[in-house]
Image (cartoon, rainbow, N blue to C red):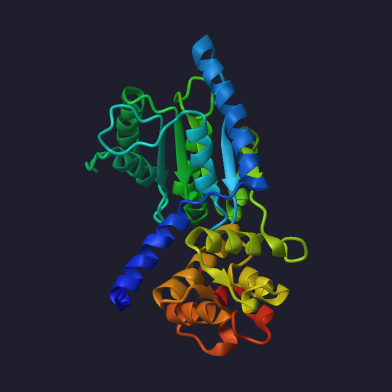
Amino acid sequence: MDAPMTNIALRQHALAQNQRLEEIWFDRRDSARIKSAIVDAYAEFEYSLKSGSRFDAPALAILGKSGSGKTASVIRALIGLGLFETVTGDPHRPFLECALSGKASLRDLAQAVLQAYGWTGSTGSAKTLWSKACDYMAELETRVLILDEIQHVRAAGPQDRKDLQAYLKSIVQPGGHRFMPILVGMPEFEEVLNSDTQLDRRYIKIKMRSLDPSVDLAVGMQILETYCHTVDVTMHDSVMTEEFASRLMHAGMYSFGIVSLWCRRGLFRAISSGSNELQIQHFQDAYVAREDCVPALNPFIAVNFHSIKEDQLTD
């Protein structure tokens, strides 16, 4: 007879199962819209490069709440085009992803690009650093630059914001750098685009949609059912009700990625406790473990869970 699994073994098993779940991709409307826009823009970009014409580089701004799957959808679309994922040291890097920090300056953005290439030097002006970054892009044949967390431009000081806006315009103008920029960030970045007519008209905006409880309750349940089937866990009646679906969506802040995350957290709690049946108690415990909150602020327990404001929830 097999010995029962220890707490450590159960947790390791739960971690392995969670990793399997993280690799599952759900096709949905927003991802399809992003893929279509990237395919069209990249086709235009490649044609312009091959024809040798001067052109406005196709540019996209993907805007959505945290956890909506913006960056993952962009990367998946690029991989679908044959632009494979790479790491520092690879001789060819068809696309590069870097993130703007809260510091939000043109020099800081140049440093982020260089660090993504593995270059750790930090001396020099923004112009010097961008020149170095462009040398790397040309040498490693980077065709797409993903600038993530672009909403931090809003928090920049007046001169830094002006410099960043000017740069975002320059990289798409004829004679600019020969790569296609994709800006990824929170919805509030639209204010930056709208504040500059030239900047706004040069970027095609794609806005991620929040889940709507009036029509999307089944979405969370489909995610949960797929996950449970994958790891061979059954669903208790307590997680098969419309009320639970509403609680799950509210806990996930009506964001597809965060709803998926809470599905995985509930399952992790069940598997690590040795259960092969998922119950609402597992979600309640998972939320307490992360937030250490009173029941009234736990969306899986609170009677009036809809009254819990978004800034009181955890992602």
x, y percentage for residue 284? 53, 81
Q: Nearer the viewer, residue 10 or 101?
A: 10
Residue 176, relative to residue 181: is it above or below? above
Look at the image and tell me in which quarter the N terminus lies.
bottom left
Residue 121 horizontal side relative to residue 60, left or right: left
Identify the residue at horizontal 60%, vertical 37% (top origin).
35
User: Which residue of the protein is positioned furthest toward the right in this rendering?
Assistant: 214
Measured as percent of width and height from the top left, residue 259 is found at 58, 64
Q: Is residue 196 at least partly visible in the picture?
A: no
- Identify whether 245 is placed above or below 144: below
Is residue 181 depicted above or below 267 in this figure? above
Quarter of the image for residue 271 reads bottom left
Q: Is residue 54 left or right of residue 132?
A: right
- Is residue 280 toward the left or the right of residue 289 in the image? right
Q: Residue placed farthest to the front in the image?
A: 1
Residue 152, position as x, y percentages in the image: 48, 53
Q: Is residue 38 visible?
A: yes
Q: Is residue 64 above or below residue 139?
A: below
Q: Position of residue 153 (x, y in %)?
A: 49, 50
Which residue is located at x 64 percent, y 46 percent? 30
* Residue sitting at the far top: 51
